[in-house]
């Protein structure tokens, strides 16, 4: 409960309900509203944390946001080491150095498929910015 309160009120996370009751409900409605208020969103386009340092397939929710908010640039950020500093299932940060690589902004290209392809390519490029030691 304390972590939920902290996340909602201090970090101001926007929880995404992926089990929405009907198809008419937009699970990203709160994100659209935040963008209308010119707030910054930090999204993890994989949907959730998986195995440490293994990138999984990107979810298309970010493309839906980009399509409905084409004036908002999407800035890809590749991280390495978060699996050690915030292990899945953990509620406490573990002190550890992380690498963060920030890419060039992506503008809405006109289609979801083109956007997702561009985003995947940018992540792949950012992942080669440094020669990372094997995950232990």
Image: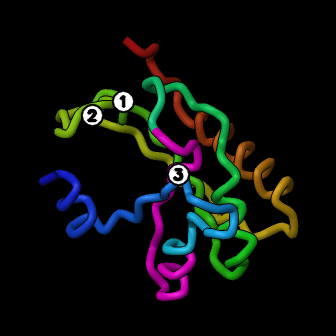
Q: Earlier in the sequence, mark 3 or mark 2?
A: 3
State left or right for residue 72 relative to residue 112. left
For mark 2, what is the residue?
Answer: 85
Q: The residue tagged with tag 1: helix, strand or loop?
A: helix
Query: What colour scheme governs how the chains and residues are painted in the rendered image of this protein?
Result: rainbow
Question: Where's residue 126, x and y in %?
Answer: 60, 42
Crowd around label 2: few <14 · some 14–19 · many ≥20 (10 Å) = some
For mark 3, what is the residue?
Answer: 77
Q: Are marks 2 and 1 in contact (CB under 8 Å)?
A: yes
Question: Where's residue 55, x and y in %?
Answer: 57, 31
Q: Are marks 3 and 2 in contact (CB under 8 Å)?
A: no
The part of the chain drawn in magenta is 32-48
Q: Is residue 47 magenta?
A: yes
Q: The residue tagged with tag 3: helix, strand or loop?
A: strand
> Marks 3 and 1, Cα distance to the nearest angstrom?
15 Å
Q: Which residue occupies the foreground of this view, 17 or 23?
A: 23
């Amino acid at each position: 409960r304390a972590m939920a309160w902290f996340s909602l009120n201090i970090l101001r996370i926007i929880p995404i309900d992926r089990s929405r009751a009907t198809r008419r409900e937009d699970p990203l409605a709160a994100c659209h509203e935040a963008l209308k208020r010119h707030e910054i969103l930090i999204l993890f386009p994989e949907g959730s944390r998986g195995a440490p340092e293994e990138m999984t397939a990107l979810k298309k929710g970010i493309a839906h946001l980009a399509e409905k908010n084409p004036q908002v640039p999407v800035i890809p950020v590749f991280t390495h080491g978060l699996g050690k500093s915030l292990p899945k299932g953990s509620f406490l940060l573990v002190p550890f150095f992380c690498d963060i690589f920030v890419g060039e902004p992506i503008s809405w290209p006109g289609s979801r498929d083109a956007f997702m392809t561009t985003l995947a390519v940018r992540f792949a490029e950012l992942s080669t910015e440094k020669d990372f030691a094997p995950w232990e």
